[in-house]
Image: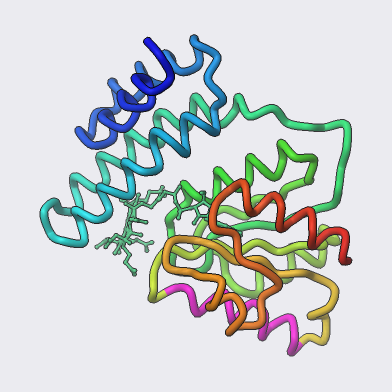
């Protein structure tokens, strides 16, 4: 089996809502020494996006969406820990979470793991995180960067709330804010006065490296 075939097996497992097949394909990826990020971003992620498109077109419904997400989580639970954590260097702390009202965590978890792998100390606040909590935890951890993930058009407004909250507390300059998640764009990031937008895990690491130097 080559990498392309394993990537296809990972994708097929998500598209057929099959956690057992997802586990098998993830184990095959690990056995052949595939870069775990490659397995996630080339195999799993495009498939879960296809599932999302089908859900949007009402070709499938919530139960299928949930089963696909379970299969994705199964594979990710095997692959994410294999992204090596660079403990030797600590570039600084990033406080990250998914905004209030939003429980999507897959993309945030990938970003979080990639930041750790690149030498950042990451405090992951989880999902459905209140605006004030982002700010309080960033203060406590003396985090140079706050990362806010939002996957729904109804929740992206909370990314702006975080920035407004920092401004109202007169600590906007203390914490750079980077935003990301499905419906967000570079244009949106500029509009709300964020310090940057991460389209995927790799661009987010580049962005965080840039922001940490600026601080
Ligand atoms: C999986 C999924 C779920 C799973 C979530 C499981 C979990 N534990 O995370 C479940 C089934 C629970 C779910 C529930 C719901 N979902 Co949903 N879901 C999805 C789906 C299919 C995939 C999301 C995903 O994981 N993508 C893969 C990851 C890798 O991509 P990503 O998140 O974009 O992350 C990357 C980048 O954006 C970036 N990034 C991400 N975060 C961050 C953060 C920072 C700081 C930075 C810099 C970068 C960054 O890097 C990541 C890695 O490359 C999307 C469809 C889609 N195309 O997005 C719908 C989708 C997001 N869901 C949707 C909806 C409507 C819902 C529900 C309301 C459904 C319902 N009726 O109950 C609920 C919401 C509940 C809630 N309150 O949050 C809609 C949202 C529509 C909208 N625009 O508002 C979508 C778009 C589906 C659709 N097309 O209609 N969902």
Which percent across, then down, holds residue 48?
Answer: 33, 44
Q: Quadrant of residue 57?
A: bottom left
Name the residue furthest left.
Answer: 59
- Above/below status of 146 relative to 174: above
Which percent across, then down, holds residue 128?
Answer: 50, 62
Please name whichever residue, 136 or 7, is drawn nearer the observer in this view of the structure: 7
Q: Look at the image and tell me in which quarter the C terminus lies.
A: bottom right
Total numbered circles? 0
Q: Please name the residue shown 74% across and 56% down the image.
A: 208
Instruction: Please state if 43 lies on the left or on the right of 169 as rendered.
Output: left
Find out whether residue 106 is within the magenta segment.
no
Instruction: Please state if 165 lies on the left or on the right of 6 as rendered.
Output: right
Instruction: Please state if 112 lies on the left or on the right of 1 as rendered.
Output: right
Q: Look at the image and tell me in which quarter the N terminus lies.
A: top left
Magenta: main secondary structure equals helix
Which percent across, then down, holds residue 118?
Answer: 75, 40
Q: Please name the residue shown 64% across and 54% down the image.
A: 204
- Above/below status of 31 relative to 89: above
Please name whichever residue, 108 or 50, is drawn nearer the observer in this view of the structure: 50
Instruction: Please state if 70 lies on the left or on the right of 183 as rendered.
Output: left
Which percent across, then down, holds residue 157?
Answer: 50, 79
Q: What sort of colour scheme is used for the picture?
A: rainbow
Q: Quadrant of residue 159?
A: bottom right
Find out whether residue 164 is within the magenta segment.
yes
Query: In the rendered structure, which segment of residues is drawn in magenta?
Result: 155-168
Q: Please name the residue shown 79% across and 80% down the image.
A: 172
Q: Is residue 40 visible?
A: yes
Q: Is residue 134 visible?
A: no
Q: On the rendering, which quadrant does ligand 1 occupy?
A: bottom left
- Above/below status of 158 relative to 73: below
Please name whichever residue, 199 or 116, is drawn nearer the observer in this view of the structure: 199
Q: Please name the residue shown 31% across and 32% down the image.
A: 11
């Amino acid at each position: 089996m080559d990498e392309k075939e394993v990537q296809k097996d990972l994708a097929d497992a998500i598209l057929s809502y099959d956690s057992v097949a997802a586990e098998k394909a993830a184990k095959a990826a690990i056995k052949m020494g595939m870069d775990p990020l490659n397995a996630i971003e080339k195999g799993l992620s495009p498939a879960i996006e296809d599932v999302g498109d089908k859900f949007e077109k009402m070709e499938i419904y919530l139960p299928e969406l949930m089963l696909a997400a379970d299969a994705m989580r199964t594979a990710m639970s095997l692959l994410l820990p294999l992204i090596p954590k660079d403990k030797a260097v600590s570039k600084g702390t990033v406080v990250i979470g998914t905004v209030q009202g939003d429980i999507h965590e897959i993309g945030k978890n990938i970003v979080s793991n990639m930041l750790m792998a690149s030498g950042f100390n990451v405090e992951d606040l989880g999902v459905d995180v209140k605006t004030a909590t982002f700010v309080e935890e960033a203060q406590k951890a003396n985090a140079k960067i706050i990362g806010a993930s939002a996957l729904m058009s109804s929740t992206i407004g909370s990314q702006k709330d975080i920035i407004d909250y920092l401004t109202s507390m007169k600590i906007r300059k203390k914490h750079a804010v980077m935003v990301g998640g499905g419906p967000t764009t570079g244009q949106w990031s500029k509009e709300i006065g964020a310090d940057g937008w991460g389209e995927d895990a790799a661009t987010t690491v580049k962005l965080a490296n840039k922001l940490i130097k600026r601080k």
